[in-house]
Amino acid sequence: MSSYTKPAPNFDLSSPSPAYTLASGDKMPIMAYGTFRSNPGEVGPAVIEALKAGYRHLDLAHVYGNEEEIGKALKQAFDEGIVTREELFITGKLWNSDHDVDIVPQAAAHSLNNLQLDYFDLYLIHFPVCWKHTGLATPGWGASELGDTPLIDTWRAMEDLVEKGVCKNIGVSNYPMMVMHDLVTQAKIQPVCNQIEVHAYYQRESLVNYCLSRNICVTAHTPLGGGVLNSETWDTPIPLKDPIILEIAKKHGKSPAQVLLRSLLQRGIVILPKSVKPHRMAENKDILDFSLTETEMKKIATLDKYVSYKTNPNPLSSFMGGPDNFSCLGTDIFD
């Protein structure tokens, strides 16, 4: 097998609090707490529990519909002295229907107001697609129409947010490699992060190694392959039940989830697990006291199916019922 570029991880797993050093010099904790698929009335208490469990990196998004509840939880945490704002690294995301140049700063301000915050540590373009604006309080989903703002124009507006101090860092999410490279060649302020679907069944080595070679942090938003919920919803196979993962987990006295999360960290990838259960939150963080051998990592590498399980809400079905719906399932922007 020929050699290829495989950058070393940009963080020290032997540190008690490992952090990825972003291109800006800011430190991003390598284990984040995710807030996707959190029901109303559930996400606020879950954020408090996550902070108590030691999470200092929170991953949020306007389209999740829970910013206001999270904002109340953050205020409670600050008021009760659980954590200070300066101790947190908070990521937000710009939704597809807010890409217009004049809307970008309004969307960021709207989210920050919901969260009762003054700035984002990181602000991401959620998907590489522009939809027609549907209102700040009503992020588009359903009968979605393609907009006409080029991605690079949206990025320029994101760069303005950095210059104005609204965001300390900017990046992207769900960007495939050639769209990522196109941005890198044009950006005045380089993206510091690409948050993507990546797990044992979809390892995306080319995209991951490309990003790391440019000191662009890769964050896995579905590090467990979507978990049991995906298996039940779409009848897709999940790494949590894979015999090789189960074998390695048994050897180390760890759970399958812990093995999957640790394998991503050893590839240099920041992880974003999500659970509303305190014991799962603690378990997902308890992965610094063991390491996988080179042989075990190679075994996990053989599991790659090179298939997206669309575990993030691919906006495929959102086009249905609209003029830009181009298949019986919707429009797949990654075709």
Image (tube, rainbow, N blue to C red):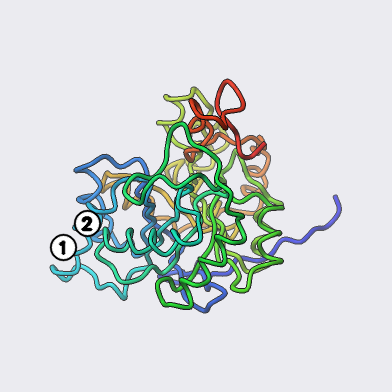
Say if 295 sits above or below 89 in the image: above
Say if 38 sits above or below 57 in the image: above
Say if 28 sits above or below 321 in the image: below
**Residue 200: percent from left, percent from top:** 58, 42
Disc 1 and disc 2: Cα gap in Å?
Answer: 8 Å
**Residue 299: percent from left, percent from top:** 65, 42
Circles 1 and 2: CB distance less than 8 Å?
Answer: yes
Residue occupying image coordinates x 42% and y 41%: 140
Q: Nearer the viewer, residue 287 or 229?
A: 229
Residue at far right of view: 2
Badge 2 amino acid: Ile
Element under disc 2: helix
Image quarter (top left, top right, bottom left or bottom right) of the C terminus: top right
Q: Earlier in the sequence, mark 1 or mark 2?
A: 2
Q: Which residue is mark 2?
A: 48
Q: Name the front one of labels 1 and 2.
A: 1
Q: Nearer the viewer, residue 155 or 43?
A: 155
Q: Which residue is mark 1?
A: 76
Badge 1 amino acid: Gln
